[in-house]
Image (spheres, rainbow, N blue to C red):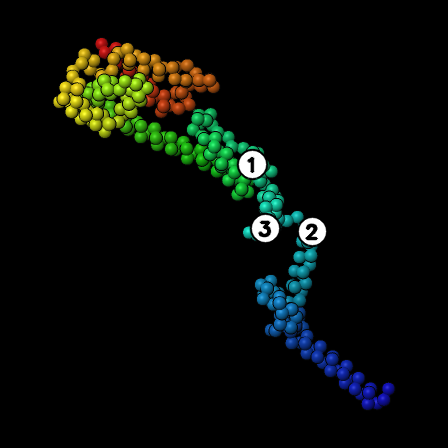
Amino acid sequence: MTEASGTQVANESSAEQGAQTETSQTFVDAEGNFMPGWREHYVPEEMRADKVFDTFTDVGGSLKMLGNLQNMIGKKGVIVPGEASPPTEWDNFHREMGRPDTKDLFQMKVADDLAEVYDKGLMAEARDIFFDLGFDQKKVDRLWAFEEKRIRASLKAIANQELEADNAFSEWSANNEDKLHWANRLISENCTDDEHKAALLKALDNNIPFAELLFNVSAKFKEHKIITETEHPSGILPADALTEAKKIENTPGFLLPDDKGQFLRETNRPEYNRLEKERDKFYKLANPT
């Protein structure tokens, strides 16, 4: 090797070492902390905007994070599918989160006293919704308990409204016996179908506006001699009243247990009270003395 070529090699080696020293001194200090510009120098351009690099402050911390990520590879985990993911991925995800394999496996118990209130079609629809949303049994239990609470509150409110209406009608009836008498007569003397007659008499119960309307119509009838005074002030024959009372007593669960061995007064107290009152009214009409 000539003296000139040896000098050239020595100069190139010296320049390379100087560049390396300059690089390390520029972007990493003696304690391993990153210096301004390190991301632009070390990180590929297409990855520089990633937020993960905001957490890197030194070489030691970066290597530690890399080691932790490596240790996590292969561990069990759940990946949330995206909007474009196929149904199979969503099924796998819901299964990992605790959803049963089929909607029929959801337990949705109904209290015995509410069995007649729940609609089986709506219950099936609820199962579909719970399944599609990926619910597990614990979520279903909480929602189903809330549904029972909501239904009981609704039934209580209805019972209170019926009681208020009953009290109001009783007070009105006591002060308007003549109006109630003519309302009953209008139905009894102008309705030939027994079922329709019973339905109208039932609708009259606890319905003050309806009773007032029938009384006003009966007044028009009296003016034109369409109806006249009768020996049956109630507007319904005693025999018919007795028949209606017996029909009520034959209601399943009223006097005798229904096909499930239950009594109406235990499973649906408001309905039992309503029927009992209607039964007593017909007995009074059947036995005016």
Mark closest to the chain's N terminus, 2 or 1 = 2
Q: Which residue is labeled 2 in the image?
A: 74
Q: Which residue is labeled 3 in the image?
A: 85
The x and y percentages for residue 136 are 55, 40
Circle 3 residues within 10 Å: few <14, some 14–19, many ≥20: few
**Which mark identifies residue 103?**
1
Q: Are marks 3 and 2 in contact (CB under 8 Å)?
A: no
- C-alpha gap between disc 2 and disc 1: 32 Å
Q: Can residue 55 be seen by looking at this rendering?
A: no
Q: Residue at x 19, y 20 (%)?
A: 182
Quarter occupied by residue 113: top left
Circle 1 residues within 10 Å: few <14, some 14–19, many ≥20: some
Q: Which amino acid type is marked by label 1?
A: Lys
Direction left: furthest residue: 223
| Mark whose residue sits in front, 3 or 2 | 3
- C-alpha gap between disc 3 and disc 2: 22 Å
Q: Which amino acid type is marked by label 2?
A: Gly
- Closer to the camera in the image, 288 or 270: 288
- Closer to the camera in the image, 214 or 59: 214
